[in-house]
Image: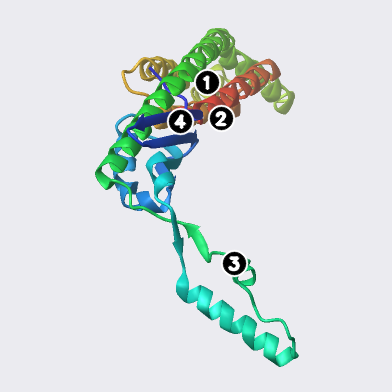
């Protein structure tokens, strides 16, 4: 079953005092690409996070953001940056003396500086942190997979309807294409009749040869057979166990090549219009296929 490449998932996992939230957004991409944003305490987990996501997804750009909250760290108190406090006090005193101010710096002046007293940073249980983050990412990756599959079902129905419309129109085109040699023969006879109006009857053998040459050049039966084969392969790929957007994209290119060849051989306006309409239908399929994993 095919899967869409665009989706969003969010998961929260808590164990003991640690809560991790993982948010994953996926976008179209030719390959599997990652953009991972982690808090400082989780920087060593990036490769493990990529491995977790790769279990469920094989293509697309994955934007992963992880946030962590440790409730236990709220009871750890505060840290005082004594060196910064002393340096700041000395700087204030120096400014006071230079300006000839009578007021001495006070504790409140020192505390007004940023980052003198800050919440104490307590190193979390790294093993527990790693486990919680990994499980949150796994939950999000699985949820993302479900969403991509659900969107893939919508794409499946749409694309199968569109490829059936192309197949139906190809049946009509095949019928019309059978008239091309007759049309070329008629045009050739009219042209030769004008050119040999004063030379008597046209050599039927020579006419037959020219008609055969034109008929061969205008024959689109091979292109029609190949398109029929592409349609069967398209359906087979759509029903494969694993989503294969790149294979579908290649088939679209092959469809387009055959349509261009038929268009160049078309000898009547109606047939040319049919080819234009087929290419328009194909373009809509191509746009959808770009979103398939």
Q: Vertically, is 13 above or below 270?
A: below
Q: Which residue is mark 1?
A: 215
Q: Marks 4/3: CA distance?
A: 64 Å
Q: Marks 4/2: CA distance?
A: 17 Å
Give the structural element (helix, strand or loop) at label 2: helix
Give the structural element (helix, strand or loop) at label 4: helix
Toward the viewer: 227 or 216?
Answer: 227
Q: Earlier in the sequence, mark 3 or mark 2?
A: 3
Q: Which residue is mark 3?
A: 111
Placement of the N terminus among the 4 image quadrants: top left
Q: Marks 3/2: CA distance?
A: 77 Å
Placement of the C terminus among the 4 image quadrants: top left
Q: Which residue is mark 4?
A: 249
For disc 4, the neighbor class at 10 Å (few under 14, some 14 to 19, many from 20) is some
Mark in the foreground, 4 or 2? 4
For disc 2, the neighbor class at 10 Å (few under 14, some 14 to 19, many from 20) is some
Q: Marks 1/2: CA distance?
A: 18 Å
The residue depicted at 38 percent of the width and 19 percent of the height is 233
Q: Marks 1/3: CA distance?
A: 95 Å
For disc 1, the neighbor class at 10 Å (few under 14, some 14 to 19, many from 20) is some
Mark in the foreground, 1 or 3? 3
Q: Which residue is mark 2?
A: 260
Q: Quadrant of residue 103?
A: bottom right
């Amino acid at each position: 079953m095919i899967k869409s490449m665009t989706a969003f998932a969010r998961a929260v996992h808590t164990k003991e005092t640690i809560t991790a939230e993982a948010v994953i957004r996926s976008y179209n991409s030719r390959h599997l690409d990652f953009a991972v944003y982690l808090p400082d305490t989780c920087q060593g987990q990036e490769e493990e996070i990529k491995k977790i996501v790769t279990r469920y997804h094989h293509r697309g750009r994955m934007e992963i953001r992880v946030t962590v909250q440790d409730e236990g760290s709220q009871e750890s108190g505060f840290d005082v940056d004594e060196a910064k406090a002393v340096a700041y006090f000395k700087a204030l005193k120096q400014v006071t003396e230079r300006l000839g101010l009578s007021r001495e710096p006070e504790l409140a002046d020192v505390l007004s500086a940023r980052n003198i007293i800050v919440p104490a940073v307590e190193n979390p249980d790294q093993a527990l942190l790693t486990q919680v983050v990994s499980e949150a990412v796994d939950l999000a990756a699985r949820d993302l997979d479900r969403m991509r599959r659900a969107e893939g079902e919508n794409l499946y129905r749409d694309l199968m309807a569109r490829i059936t419309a192309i197949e139906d129109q190809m049946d009509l085109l095949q019928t019309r294409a059978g008239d091309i040699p007759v049309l070329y023969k008629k045009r050739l006879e009219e042209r030769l009749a004008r050119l040999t109006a004063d030379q008597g009857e046209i050599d039927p053998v020579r006419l037959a040869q020219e008609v055969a040459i034109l008929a061969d050049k205008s024959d689109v039966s091979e292109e029609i057979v190949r398109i029929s084969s592409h349609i069967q392969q398209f359906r087979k790929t759509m029903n494969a166990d694993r989503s294969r957007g790149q294979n579908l994209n290649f088939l679209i290119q092959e469809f387009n090549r055959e349509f261009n060849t038929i268009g160049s051989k078309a000898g009547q306006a109606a047939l040319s219009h049919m080819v234009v309409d087929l290419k328009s239908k194909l373009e809509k399929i191509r746009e959808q296929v770009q979103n398939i994993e």
